[in-house]
Amino acid sequence: MSGSVTTLCSNVVNAENLALTRNQRLFVSGRDGVYELSRSAGGGCGTELVPVRVPGVPDQCMLNGIVAQEDCLYLACVHIDEASIPLIPTVLGDVNQIEQTTIGLLRSYLETMVCPVDSYIVRCDLGQTPLAFTDLLARLPGHVMANGITTDATGRNLYVANSAPGSAAGIYRIPLDAGDPSGATLWCRPPGCKPNGLKVQGDVLYYTGNGAVAAVLGSVPIEQDGAAGEPRVIDTGGLVVDDFDLADEGFVVAQFSESMVFGSGFLRFLSRHGRELAVLKRDEIANPSAVAVARESSALFRAGDVVLVDKARRGVSLFEPDARWRKWLLASA
């Protein structure tokens, strides 16, 4: 693919996910909180920390999926309780705060097999000043490792991917107006994978997930009564996929690495039927974990640019495609 890849910012430790609001404000989740990125006075990229200050939510959490809905941000927080294995954090550091490199991610998955895991969905009102996550929307039940999150087309429900190893892996649904932190319910268990990234378009939920044999991109119809329909596999390419975004004519998928353990990652561009149309491999891309197609221009990017979180590079990069691919990405804009 032709086009340039440039760095927007490179100072977000454990950069994981991103959200674009309807007016193109850009937020990125990292180790210390969520950062809003903006154009600085000197023409560079400025970052402003949006801290997590929610009663009952541990200070040391992994901050994962983030989504914007109307005037709010929602964030998935995970805490692994290492009290039963005190020697490990003493020697290797708190798993909730370590760099989420490939090795770090493997450690966290291994520890979820032996340690209690708590997951929380917290909310930030974008109308308040200063910004902070202060409200608890839900505490997910049981052994849940909350990862990707999204809202449905009505804006009434939040969907959360549980990426924990074992039989609990699945997609949970939370009513946004429930007012009950225990309101999360298991909605669907896509076969053959641990769900990771989630997106909803119309009455279909799309997901990525990693399985024992291959990574999966699939879809689940949302029935009229809100129940999950029959999951359908769209693509099984690659081994380690992370998040993705929808383009009008297909998907942009973040391939975290080339193998189960090591290797640089890249972006895959797929048709709606799962056919691979192009791959973006560049020296400037190391381990992408999330992507978003900019629908409108802002001070940081143009409409049709692809914003990507790169975990290994501790920040956010920008792919500026040529005219042909920009048209493909924005066909309905």
Image: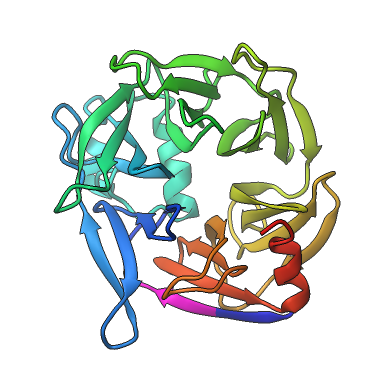
Which is nearer the eye, 109 or 75?
A: 75
Which is nearer the eye, 298 or 285?
A: 298
Tell me where residue 305 appears, x and y as whole percent: 59, 70
Taking 193 as reference, is 25 left or right?
left
Which is nearer the eye, 212 or 203?
A: 203
Q: Residue at x 50, y 53 (%)?
A: 102
Tell me where residue 185 appears, x and y as whole percent: 46, 13
Residue 283 higher or lower than 311, as above or below: below
Residue 155 higher or lower than 166, as above or below: below
Residue 305 higher or lower than 63, as above or below: below
Q: Is residue 113 magenta?
A: no
Q: Which residues are magenta?
A: 6-10
Where the C terminus falls, by quadrant?
bottom right
Tell me where residue 113 appears, x and y as whole percent: 44, 25
Tell me where residue 200 appears, x and y as whole percent: 60, 36
- From where the camera sits, is residue 150 visible? yes
Where the N terminus falls, by quadrant?
bottom right
Q: Quadrant of residue 252?
A: bottom right
Q: Is residue 8 magenta?
A: yes
- From where the camera sits, is residue 18 visible? no
Taking 209 as reference, is 164 left or right?
left
Q: Residue at x 49, y 73 (%)?
A: 301
Which is nearer the eye, 130 or 94?
A: 130
